[in-house]
Image (tube, rainbow, N blue to C red):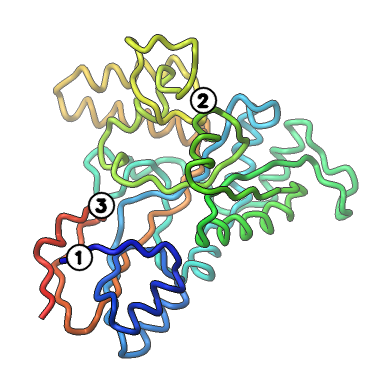
Amino acid sequence: MRVKIVRDPTTLALELLGGTVHLAVNAQLSPDFVAEQQAGRRLRVVISDGAALEYIGINTTDPILRDRRVRQALAYGIDRRAIIANLLRGQARLAKSVLPPTHWAYHETTKTYEYDPARARRLLDEAGYRDPDGEGPQPRFRLTLKTSSAEHPRKIATALQEQLRALGIELHIQSFEFQTFLNDINTGNFQLFFLRQIGANQFTDIFKAAFGSRSIPNDPTIRESERTGFLNRARYRNPHLDALIERAEATSDRAEQRALYARIQEILAEDVPWITLWYPANVALMNPRVRVPAIPASGDFHFLKDVDVP
């Protein structure tokens, strides 16, 4: 088997149709293209539930975004169901936790931010960001959302821009080559960012790595000997959450762990350092002659060893 990296989705689609590529898995091909192939017969399409997470990271130290009411308003102001149905063509499931629903520690009753623009506006008003001219063009405030330069995140960003405009929030989009984008979010040079979390959210370690107070990347106040991770790009600090994570990791009692991780998920849902959007489906397109085993929810590529290409 030969692995080929094709970064442009249009080029990849043409190579699949032309037979020079036999299998593409989670390649962020256009959902419209995937739907077209489902309706036709040129390529075989296999779609299954995925466990990766797409989310919006929020800089909790930003002067506007440090107010939890503003972060909650953003969450209420995003119509995730509409984006999944229309832009993603149903190829995702709503998320309300960092963990996937199949994880033993997943908390089913975690607070969910269903689309509620009226509630979002009330929260913004309470936070002191009243709309200066009602239905007029003046925004309550302006925010910048950073993404990579890939097509998928830019399309999501445009949809978010339109939805937040209805709340009176002017959202600017900045897209960068991935390494530049990663450097910005790791150094806190952002207000909002859009990203896909793959792999790390399959383990409860994600809570310490992404939300622990000693897991903030490039924070000079953290001694490297005491560092617990590098994924807390939201720069979120909550000593109570830190203590709960320590307790959950210290006990071997599964019932106690489950209760502690449930409380951790409730706190994160209330504080909103991330807006958990959806779990993208695992999408595989292939030459009809190719046979693949079941793709694991995590999107792990170990299944490739069992792929059969006659």
Q: Which residue is mark 3?
A: 298
* Residue 66 position in % (x across, y down): 63, 26
* Residue 141 position in % (x across, y down): 78, 40
Q: Secondary structure at mark 1?
A: loop
Q: Which is more N-terminal, label 3 or label 2?
A: 2
Q: Secondary structure at mark 2?
A: loop
Q: Which residue is mark 1?
A: 2
Q: Residues within 10 Å of mark 2 (few under 14, many from 20)?
A: many
Q: CA distance from mark 2 to mark 1?
A: 40 Å
Q: Amino acid at mark 1?
A: Arg
Q: CA distance from mark 1 to mark 3?
A: 22 Å
Q: Residue furthest bottom?
A: 41
Q: Which residue is mark 2?
A: 235
Q: Amino acid at mark 3?
A: Ser
Image-based side of 270 in relation to 172, left or right: left
- Camera-near label (2 vs 1) is 1
Give the residue at x 73% y 55%: 166
